[in-house]
């Protein structure tokens, strides 16, 4: 392989690397493939490690998007905050959590350091992104100033806001409006780079057309970078540092400029629960399956439900999970579904099966036991009354 072929291969590999999206544990992704067919993707089932996983965004025109949507990373109560969430919507398990409990009365300051959320100078948690960290710091800052009597309703309002499908639609509409010509220009740049520049350079080398091709490419990347910067400033006003880095990268790297629409939309829905994002982006059947998964996760959390024996921490986890469960059931009812229908117990798939796991639905031939995949959750017998959440 000659130097020219090696250079073109490196260019293709750089572009493919730009199409890889790292989704941290504690979040799910909704991938829009070629502008349609949005699906919830669990990065834990793909390439990854204990911190997260990679997934591939659509590399070919028309370019799609990957929306990252985390679930709330702390358990809140009127008394305090617990840096732990029993929610686990990923097949790879829960993210690593500090399980630090702090009473609201003891909070002196809340700050951010990159993705880290700091309370009283110590690390509370590491968020899925700097965007999510800033949002959480703002929420905690408001809650700590409230009296205890008003904190419960404020927390419930925060949960409801995260399940506002209309707000998700408005946010997506704002992004489409602010993006303007960026998607068209990015797709055009892809065609220009890989279907015009690469074939001409491959055939004639850089000498004959090199300067003209480079000039055309720079004109497109500069235009995309400027438009991206304007849209990003409106959609993410507090993200000045991230915006500057991306702006410079797009000026110098056409593969990054091609992915501008995806980069602009990736963190758009991080203030919302994945269930609200799925309602707007996914098809009805996919949403119903995911809604069942969310309900079962709230009613039958992965064991251990709480990793510490501190009574205040346990109370916060239980209070917040109950508030989230109430809000989720109300949201599901508002969109025309019934929670009890979504969570109906399965029927035995084999005559010998006598029990099942109420969380994952796995079936067993034993009458009593636990589900190892769900951390040792007790099994339910077929035909028994609906069990209480344990």
Image (tube, rainbow, N blue to C red):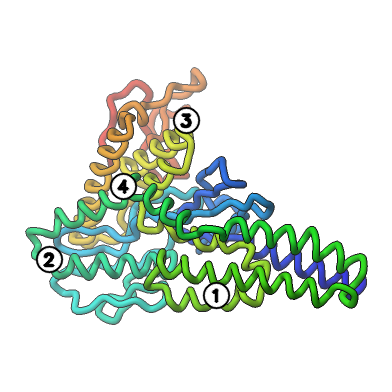
Q: What is the crowding at mark 1: few (fewer than 14 residues within 10 Å), some, or many (at least 20)?
A: many
Q: Position of residue 77 (x, y in %)?
A: 19, 58
Mark 4 is surrounded, within 10 Å at the Cα level, by few (under 14), some (14 to 19) or many (20 or more) other residues, namely: some
Sooner in the amino-acid sequence: mark 1 or mark 3: 1
Q: Which residue is mark 3?
A: 364
Q: Badge 3 local density, few (<14 within 10 Å), some, or many (20+)?
A: many
Sequence-first disc among 4 and 1? 4
Q: Is 326 positioned to the left or the right of 361 in the image?
A: left
**Residue shown at 36% from the left, 31% from the top:** 343
- The numbered mark, 4 or 2, whose residue comes first in the sequence reads 2
Residue named by callout 4: 164
Frontmost of labels 1 and 3 is 1
Q: CA distance from mark 4 to mark 2?
A: 23 Å
Question: Residue 308 appears at what percent x and percent y?
Answer: 28, 61
Identify which residue, 207 or 372, lies in the foreground.
207
Secondary structure under the numbered disc 4 in the rendered image: loop
Instruction: Locate residue 225, reporting x and y percent.
Output: 57, 71
Residue with the mark numbered 2: 146
User: Which label sits in the foreground, 1 or 2?
Assistant: 1
Residue at 49% of width from left, 21% of height from top?
Answer: 352
Residue at the far top in the pictured view: 351
Q: Which residue is mark 1?
A: 247
Residue toward you, 216 or 205: 216
How far apart marks 4 and 3 lie (CA) works out to: 38 Å
């Amino acid at each position: 392989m000659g130097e020219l072929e090696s250079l073109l291969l490196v260019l293709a590999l750089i572009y493919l690397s730009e199409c890889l999206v790292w989704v941290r544990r504690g979040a799910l992704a909704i991938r829009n493939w070629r502008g349609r067919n949005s699906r919830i993707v669990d990065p834990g089932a793909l390439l990854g490690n204990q911190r997260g996983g990679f997934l591939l965004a659509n590399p070919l025109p028309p370019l799609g998007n990957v929306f990252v949507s985390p679930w709330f990373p702390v358990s809140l109560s009127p008394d305090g905050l617990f840096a732990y969430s029993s929610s686990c919507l990923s097949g790879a398990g829960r993210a690593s959590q500090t399980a630090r409990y702090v009473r609201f009365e003891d909070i002196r300051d809340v700050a951010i350091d990159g993705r880290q959320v700091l309370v009283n100078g110590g690390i509370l948690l590491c968020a899925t992104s700097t965007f999510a960290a800033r949002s959480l710091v703002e929420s905690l800052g408001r809650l700590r100033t409230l009296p205890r009597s008003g904190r419960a309703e404020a927390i419930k309002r925060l949960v409801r806001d995260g399940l506002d499908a209309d707000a998700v639609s408005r946010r997506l509409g704002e992004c489409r409006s602010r993006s303007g010509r960026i998607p068209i220009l990015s797709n055009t740049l892809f065609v220009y780079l890989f279907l015009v520049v690469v074939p001409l350079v491959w055939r004639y080398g850089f000498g004959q057309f090199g300067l003209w091709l480079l000039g055309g490419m720079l004109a497109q990347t500069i235009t995309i970078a400027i438009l991206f910067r304007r849209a990003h400033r409106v959609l993410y006003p507090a993200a000045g540092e991230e915006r500057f880095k991306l702006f410079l990268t797009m000026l110098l790297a056409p593969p990054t400029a091609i992915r501008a629409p995806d980069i602009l939309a990736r963190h758009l829905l991080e203030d919302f629960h994945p269930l609200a994002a799925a309602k707007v982006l996914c098809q009805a059947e996919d949403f119903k399956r995911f809604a069942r998964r969310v309900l079962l996760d709230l009613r039958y959390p992965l064991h251990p439900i709480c990793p510490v024996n501190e009574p205040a921490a346990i109370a916060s986890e239980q209070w917040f999970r109950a508030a989230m469960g109430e809000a989720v059931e109300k949201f599901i009812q508002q969109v025309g579904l019934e929670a009890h229908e979504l969570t109906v117990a399965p029927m035995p798939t084999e005559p010998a099966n006598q029990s099942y796991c109420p969380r994952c639905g796995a079936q067993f031939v034993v009458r009593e036991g636990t589900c190892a995949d769900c951390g040792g959750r007790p099994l339910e017998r077929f035909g028994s009354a609906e069990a209480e959440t344990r």
